[in-house]
Amino acid sequence: MRTISLQKENGSRQALLAVAVDEVGVNERADFFTKRSVKKDSKLTALYLALSMCDLTTLEGSDTPGRIQQLCAKARQPVPSLLIENLLQKKNLAPIPSVAAVCVYPLMVPVAAKALAGSGIGIASVATAFPSGQAPLEIKTKDTLFAIENGATEIDMVINRGAFLSGRYQEVFDEIIAIKRICSQAGSKVHLKVILETGELGSFDRVRLASDIAIEAGADFIKTSTGKITPAATLPVTLVMLHAIADHYKRTGNKIGMKPAGGIRNAKQALHYLCMVKETLGDDWLNPELFRFGASALVNDLLKQIYKELTGQYYYDKIFSLD
Amino acid sequence: MQTTQQNFEYAASIESTDVVKISAKNKLFINGQFVAPSSNKYFASINPATEEKLSEIAEANHKDVDKAVKAARKAYTQTWSKISGKERGRYLFKIARLIQERAREFAVLETLDNGKPIRESRDVDIPLVAAHFFYYAGWADKLHYAVPGCGQSSGLSGRQKAPSPLGVIGQIIPWNFPLLMAAWKIAPALACGNTLVLKPAESTSLSCLLLAEILQEAGLPDGVVNIVTGAGETGAALVAHEGVNKISFTGSTEVGRLILKSVANTNKKLTLELGGKSAHIIYEDAAQDQAIEGVINGIFFNQGHVCCAGSRLLLEESIAEVFVDKLKARMEKLRVGNPLDKNTDIGAINSLTEHQKIKKLIDTGKTEDGEFFEPSRFALPTKGYFHKPCFFNKVSSAFTLSRVEVFGPVLTISTFRTAQEAINKANDTPYGLAAGVWSEKGSKIHKTAQGLKAGVIWANTYNKFDPSSPFGGYNESGWGREGGRHGLLPYLAV
């Protein structure tokens, strides 16, 4: 059994056990969650829940203030009120929830902050030289500081995969601690999500190790992917990370959040994730404080499925805005 | 305002039973026809999940058994031994395809009659049944390759003749995998050129009788397969019948002993697939979260009614506490209930008798040793023979539950310090059917496996079945192998 030694901020050393993961077993177990039955009321509850867990995301080189404003409007009100209000009233249902947060580049944070003021919707910003993370720590901290000063309430940082894959775990650990320190200085309200970019790590053993390092370094959430690499989020890789969260909770009583991101395009997939969280971590994790989807296309499919549950039929796609 | 305040729970999804038609009275299947039993006696078949009567099953006495054996003999001499292996294979392929076509019907019927969850009958039992027929269909015309050098060379072609079949086979199967056990028996016997009389367990005859319909549909010549239903006496009559060349039995060690005595001093061949008390060894370097799933699958699959169930968990002492905690948390999430619900993980115990037997053994366990645990977060249905999954932790090898096969959802847990101790403890049993070993270190798995006296050893998984791998045990777990090339040998004169 391999252990790695990490030096903490106060100079003390900590041994971290590299937890073994069996790939065949993980895939088999993950597949199990695609077979649970979620329909009718159960499905509607799950669809509402999934929508409220979405980090509506745009991370393009071509992002502009205009585009971000559009996205923020969608975040506030995912569906035209006229289309659905009557239906909801008739069935005595709660209004369609807003998404949990929008997720944008640091330069777009000021625009999002203005557009979402007073809405309670989180402003998540990818920082730390997203998506590659290949920049000096100094740049990464400045990137983070800029986002927070301009109104980001959540930071989605990437780990240094270059350092991780060459075995420099201390460097990975230190970088997360440095970013966490900035998030904490700003007041404990800024949540830190640590992106492992699991598609670049090469094995579930490494995904588990990266999860444990991130959690030990102070991550509030661990997140699968940037969305720029294939494969991004999958059920098996998320399951490995959920086990890391479960073990940490068992040891310390602290609840770490989970965010699969990238590749979750339709409602059916999202429901599989909810089943997996329910049976792996429990109902306590089934809320936006502890579980998020990093997605863009998913939101419209959730709306489409909610509409179908309410009316018994699909509305044609164009009714929901593209953003 | 409903939605946002509700917790997310699964929706019950009950498989419709409309696909199956169960006749009120089920007859015997002899010589290609459904015939009434000569005693005119019928007994009830109960749905263990509801305790309601599903149907009535004919009780075959020695006269019916005699009729069935004679029909099998006639079919053997007149048709089945005359046709080529290729033709036998063609029948088997057809049977396999027909089972696939009616898979849903079989799955629902099996769940109604046996109590196992529809998820298992649908995803495990029935697909394996079809796979078994497909597999042995492929062997039917290749027997001279299965046992090279056995038959004589046939003339100028120099091609070996296939080894000879045995004749009429008497087969007795248990209730835990009714149709799958029938497939394990019937497919290799027919592929090798034998004819047979099959006796299903009295509590689970229905799927075998539906199989009889499939055999008719496949055009299998009359008398090649005969099915006589009934309890122990019917089985005893079959075992004792002079016209039977071989007995193949799967069931309890207790009954296995009786059969062994019965066939002593006769010319009958015998294979026995009996009980087990299989060890599941988890080393400290195992992938624990996946090992947990292996343990769950090992002991709670099919309510623990599995002869090779991993019923003795052996944990390396250094991880025991953490592992047991994880196991408890996982067991709280198991869903016990209506077997027809697709969300159900653990269904009903097959019969009242078995239910009482399990309870009695647990009571004994409680008086002896160990810390008892069962999940507290869910309740069992009020009707039906349901039982919570449970375990006894810190159990000594000397006590009842470590040695006696429970055949239910009951696990024992004890610890070991070294690989050698794990092997010694695993082998400290009168049985020797299966074992599981979990470690991320390949060499350790190989070393352990070499030391284990068990017919099947799974590494980093458990309860995986495939028609191409042989299955069978050491010592009181029986003799002979089923499955794979090895599974042909007990049906050939070699």
Image (cartoon, grey):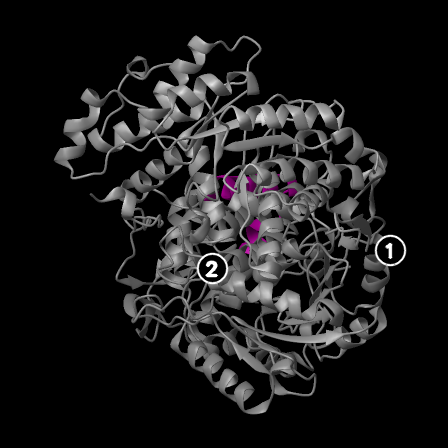
Q: Residue B397: image x %, image y %?
A: 70, 83
Residues behind callouts 2 and 1 on a single chain: yes
Residue lying at 53% horizontally and 63% vertically, measured from the top left: B329
The reply, left or right, for residue A69 in relation to residue B263 is left
Q: Residue A71: image x %, image y %?
A: 41, 17
Determine the secondary structure under disc 1.
helix
- Rendering quarter of residue B395: bottom right
Tell me the amino acid under the disc marked 2: Lys
Graded by Cα atoms within 10 Å as few (under 14), some (14 to 19) or many (20 or more), the crowding at tag 1 reads few
Does B432 appear above or below B187?
Answer: below
In reply to whether residue B79 is colored magenta, the answer given is yes
Q: What chain does badge 1 belong to?
A: B
Q: What chain does badge 2 belong to?
A: B
Viewer-nearest residue: B480 or B84: B480
Determine the secondary structure under disc 2.
loop
- In this figure, which residue is indicated by the disc labeled 2? B333
Viewer-nearest residue: B53 or A275: A275
From this viewpoint, is residue B151 visible?
no
Q: Quadrant where the C terminus of chain A lies?
A: top left
Graded by Cα atoms within 10 Å as few (under 14), some (14 to 19) or many (20 or more), the crowding at tag 2 reads some
Residue lying at 79% horizontally and 37% vertically, measured from the top left: A171
Q: Residue B324: image x %, image y %?
A: 61, 68
Does A219 appear above or below A229?
Answer: below
Q: Nearer the viewer, mark 2 or mark 1?
A: 2
How far separated are the C-alphas under marks 2 and 1? 34 Å
- In this figure, which residue is indicated by the disc labeled 1? B443
Q: Which residues are the magenta region?
A: B74-99
Does A261 appear above or below B368?
Answer: above
Viewer-nearest residue: A281 or B262: A281
- Work out which residue is located at the far bottom of the displayed protein and give it: B367
Residue lying at 72% horizontally and 35% vertically, measured from the top left: A175
